[in-house]
Amino acid sequence: MTNPYPDVLLHIGGTWRPAAAGETMNIENPVDQSVLGQLAHARIADLEQAVDSAARAFPAWKASSPFDRFKLLRRAADLLRERADRIATLMTLEQGKPRAEARLEVLAGADIIDWFAEEARRSYGRIVPARLPGVEQLVLKEAIGPVAAFTPWNFPINQAVRKISGALAAGCSIVIKGPEETPGSPAELVRAFVDAGLPEGVLNLVYGTPAVISEFLIPHPAIRKISFTGSTQVGKQLAALAGLHMKPATMELGGHAPVIVARDADVEHAARTMVAAKFRNAGQICVAPTRFLVEEPIFEHFVDVFSRTTADIVVGNGLDDSTSMGPLANARRVVAMEEFTADATEKGAQLVAGGARVGNAGNFFEPTILSHVPTDARAMNEEPFGPLALINAVDSLDAALEEANRLDYGLAAYGFTRSAANSAKMEAGITSGMISINHYGLALPEVPFGGIKDSGNGTEGGADALDAYLNTKFISRNHATR
Ligand code: NAD
């Protein structure tokens, strides 16, 4: 039988190849920590070649017509769709999420490529009326230059596809550091672009030691733009390094999403919608709902429906069709869940459900619900990034808004209410990059995706996303003297 998980190589200068020094690292299956395969580990010599390739490929790619880039990106999206089943299996093996979720991620990735393909054709400039006769003033959009991008393991395709598609659509070349723990599916994403006919050197994929790669790529003179998705702590370091070298940096960082459930909300709908959102990808999502702030009169009802719905979740191997929540992607997250739960209960929180590992092998952890969680519990302040729901009662909408805005995070927030006035109050009152009222309505290709405050800056979705990869160039032309 052929191995469903082939070893993963680097892609540099149009060639799939091992690291120059032949080094590799293990790729583990989170279901049982067995070794799935080997990943090529890039060192400085490989990185130099990757940047050199991106720099050499940039002028011709920048000069290519947006229409040609559109056609190529559309081909890549179609290839990704054709290969979705196989790529989803790779993703489940390396990351743990159920196959159905993995498949949706691949297909959503194809939709994101399509969106950026279309946006490439709309990278318009404008004409500014001049003060003098014979003068023309043009504002042009130009590809910013070779990009260095860094993406994490929670959405191996969806974090990478936003950066790759944005850069390529704008006319930029790119060196992307993929996630070392889940490298197979993003390598297949890169393969879709390569097989669609992307010129060599335009897209380069490396894996290795994250800090070594970022410290080499970010200051490198050929690199003109940085884009990172990951933790706030690392993001701040990389943004500081980018700032030191005067390079614009898009940062998609952590979150700690509040969910305000007003007393007039449809409680059943709110609880069911939020259980699905909370435990998708085992809670390892930057926009995962985390702090539930439920008005007192409906608190018991909400906790009851939330815990009964959570009890239906089937934890298991993502390759089994009956599984609705897989293992956590790495052993670090299991330790983190144990520590968050112990700390919260020691400080007085009530354990409503879960709270423990499942089995002796793999990174399985129960869907966990804590209520009456004190504000000084670690989980109320640090991003849990796992299957942990924290449900507290609040005595008013104002109290809920105050708690929602207490943290320095500002990525996603959710609200449930039947009243337009309460909805307006939440929309205006929550300090957050994205707010979804009465449903889970985030992350479509055509809408903005990004945070504020410690959750980062910039958007990786919607009509503004291409701008991150474009310079504005102003030209003033005087015809009168010709
Ligand atoms: P981590 O902080 O070690 O790593 C987070 C990501 O950043 C990883 O992809 C890692 O490869 C990368 N990274 C780390 N150091 C780097 C460096 N010096 N240069 C370049 N890249 C670097 O944490 P982790 O244990 O992998 O993940 C845990 C935390 O990360 C979570 O609690 C969550 O806050 C955050 N996270 C956020 C997202 C997101 O979508 N915003 C995704 C994954 C992880």
Image (tube, grey):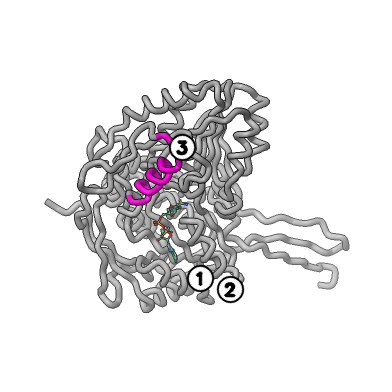
**Numbered mark located on residue 390 in the image:** 3
- Badge 2 is on which residue? 245
Does the image show residue 133?
A: yes
Point out residue 270 in the picture as x, y percentages from the top left corner: 49, 26
Residue at x 50% of width, y 65% of height: 147
Tell me which segment is drawn in magenta.
335-350
Point out residue 140 in the picture as x, y percentages from the top left corner: 67, 61
**Left or right: where does residue 274 sit relative to residue 11?**
right
Q: Amino acid at mark 3?
A: Leu
Q: Nearer the viewer, mark 2 or mark 3?
A: 3
Give the alpha-carbon distance from disc 2 to disc 1, as whole Å.
8 Å
Q: Amino acid at mark 2?
A: His
**Image: 357 above or below 18:** above
Badge 1, how many Cα within 10 Å: few under 14, some, many 20+? many
Q: Amino acid at mark 1?
A: Ile
**Image: 191 above or below 103:** below
Based on the displayed image, in which of its 4 quarters is residue 213 positioned? bottom left
Based on the displayed image, in which of its 4 quarters is residue 412 positioned? top right
Quarter that holds the C terminus: bottom right
**Left or right: where does residue 216 sit relative to residue 407?**
left
**Image: 37 above or below 293:** below
Residue 340 belongs to magenta span? yes
| Circles 2 and 1 in contact, beta carbons < 8 Å | yes
Give the alpha-carbon distance from disc 2 to disc 3, as whole Å.
41 Å
Which residue is outermost to the left?
1
Residue at x 32% of width, y 43% of height: 97
- Badge 1 is on which residue? 218
Classified by dominant secondary structure, the portion drawn in magenta counts as helix
Q: Secondary structure at mark 1?
A: loop
Q: Nearer the viewer, mark 3 or mark 1?
A: 3
